[in-house]
Amino acid sequence: MRFKVTVGIPVYNDAPHIEKCLQSVIEQTIGFQNLEIICVDDGSTDEAPQIIKKYKRNFRKYNNISYYSHPHTGNPSLSRNTIIDYAQGEYIFFVDGDDFLGVEAIEKMYSQGVKNQAEIVIGKYKGVNRNVPVKMFEEKKEKTNFFDSHVVDSLNALKMFKTSFIRENNIRFNPNIFHAEDHPFTMKAYLHAKTISIVNDYDCYYWTKYSDGTRTQLTKQLVPVDQFYAYFYETLDVINNAPLSEELKNLAAYKYWRRLLLFDIPTEFRRPRNLIDRKYSFGIVKSIALKYITDNIYKHFEGKEKLTLDIILEGSYRIFDEYMKWQKYIPSRTSQT
């Protein structure tokens, strides 16, 4: 590979923040000459493309900033797949255009990945006007895997992946998923990886949420109910098709369903949908649970997660709605995203 790390940035109307993002990559202690930046624009209507092209001109002596664009799709999947196709780095680090990195982030993540021969490296997140996963970073885990860690709490794509690993296992983003499109991608990577390495002693990734109204994030839009659940189906199919024993597949399914029951599903039912859509949404949740949760998966559930599942399987939206209110389900983004 020509570079140590490819920093892949899907871009959509990121003009107010893209310079800070790019500067944070250029100033990395690993040395800019060891990095490649690939920006892929999803049909921005602001000045983001011009800003990126300016950086490409200003740093042309390195010949390591690439810019691609395509018509607007409404999600970052095509952009991220383009990054996978063109990356010349040993690792690919997906970074969103309105986020930024700690100055030592890539050096620490890359060196730990190489040291441990890790297919995936996760750098500690630092929330900016938002909460982020924390439990998975509470202890040092330089060499771990999906089952011995809390990485299920973090199914976003904002991580470092070994390029050859992603390509050899044909791990891609589905452009037809418009919410949580990174769940099936990251789950497939987790279940194929022999080693996941976690950098927990340095704030690597500054994950932002801006309230200035300057950007409509591709992954933050309210999608129709039918489209919303696409990531449930695809991620559960990824688990069913994983190269694992049936026992481990069942355990992986349980870990994912536990996350859905305690976080994703309650979050969905706090979205501003009308009553008809909420009842329709509940019906889909029930049908997915009936389809995918076997007895060998069900036996793992306990406590609140089991109670939530049992109420869903019982099938009464009225009871489920009252249960949500009684639980005062205000899901915390400190544990999952």
Image (cartoon, helix red, strand yellow):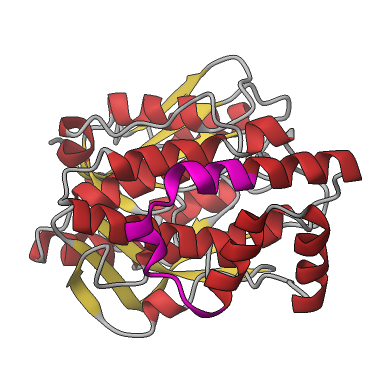
Q: Residue at x 86, y 49 (%)?
A: 272
Q: Is residue 307 above or below residue 279?
A: below
Q: Is residue 334 visible?
A: no
Q: x and y percent of residue 208 in the render? A: 62, 60
| Residue 16 lies in the magenta stretch | no
Q: Residue at x 51, y 35 (%)?
A: 10
> Which is the main secondary structure of the residues drawn in magenta?
helix
Q: Residue at x 45, y 28 (%)?
A: 174
Q: Is residue 31 visible?
A: yes
| Position of residue 289 in the picture relative to residue 252 (left or right) | right
Name the one closer to the observer, 231 or 43: 231
> Which quadrant holds residue 261?
bottom right
Q: Is residue 297 above or below residue 149?
A: above
Part of the protein shown in magenta? 285-303
> Which quadrant holds residue 92?
top left
> In the picture, which quadrant includes the N terminus?
top left
Q: Residue at x 57, y 62 (%)?
A: 309
Q: x and y percent of residue 100 in the render? A: 51, 57
> Which quadrant holds residue 172?
top left
